[in-house]
Structures are given as C-alpha cells and as structure tokens.
Amino acid sequence: MYLAERKLSQAEDSAEQCIRILSRTGHGNDISAALAYSVLGSVYSVNDDTRAEETLRSALDIPEKRLPPQDYLRGEGLASLGLFYVQRGALEKGEPLLEKAHASFRANAKLNL
C-alpha cells in the first residue's frame, strides 16, 4: 500500500521489518520474503541502484530455488529485475530476463486455462 501511494519511507520500513521478522522466525527464504524483497528493491530503485539490484536479485533468487519455471511469482521476479536493468540502459542484462519472464507468464497462463 505504501509503495503504491509513493510513501517510500514507510514502504521501506515495512518491508525491512517484514524481512527481519521472517528471518528471525526461520522463514527468511520463504516466498513471503521474496515479496518483501521485491517491495524493498522497488523502493531502493528510486535512489540507490546498488542496493536495488542486490535486493531485486534476492527477490528473484528465492522463487528460482523454490518454484517451478512457469510459476507466476518467478516471472514477477524476473520481470522486476529485467525492468530495473532496462530502465538503466543495461539492455544486455535486462532483455534476457524479460524474455524469461514472458515465457513464464505464457506457461502459467496455459496451465490455468
């Protein structure tokens, strides 16, 4: 909610708190943590490219290890990191990720027909 409202400070605090809680309770590598990393990466992408890239990579690493290739959440992680690169002019890094995201979304759509 905070991210959609562009309340970046609150979004950052909430995502960091979520990650801390999940880590403390042994769930730091669960899909919930990937979603929190994704929000945090979006916040960081506004003014801290290094932290944004690291965090978006963490948001992708979890579903890549835990979910099948066609899973929608895996596609979201690929798309987020791919868009991050493309928006910064790193097409050689971003486009392959976006292509994989597209394939994931297409496979997911076929599974849900």
Image (cartoon, rainbow, N blue to C red):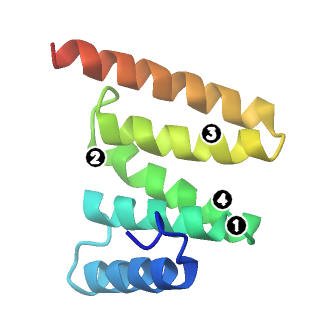
Q: Looking at the image, which residue is at 38% across and 39% down?
A: 74
Indicate which label's residue lies in the foreground, 1 or 3.
1
Q: Looking at the image, which residue is at 64% across and 70% down?
A: 44
Indicate which label's residue lies in the foreground, 2 or 3.
3
Instruction: Identify residue for label 3.
Output: 82
Distance, label 4 to label 3, CA atoms, is 10 Å
Quadrant where the image shows the C terminus: top left
Residue 20 on image: x %, y %:
36, 85
Q: Label 1 is placed on what type of residue?
A: Val
Instruction: Identify residue for label 2.
Output: 66
Q: Label 4 is placed on what type of residue?
A: Glu
Question: Could you say whether the residue bearing mark 1 is in a helix, strand or loop?
Answer: loop
Residue 112 on image: x %, y %:
16, 19
Name the mark on residue 21.
Answer: none
Neighbour class for label 2 at 10 Å: few (<14), some, many (≥20)? few
Question: Could you say whether the residue bearing mark 3 is in a helix, strand or loop?
Answer: helix
Q: Is residue 24 above or below residue 93?
A: below
Name the mark on residue 46.
Answer: 1
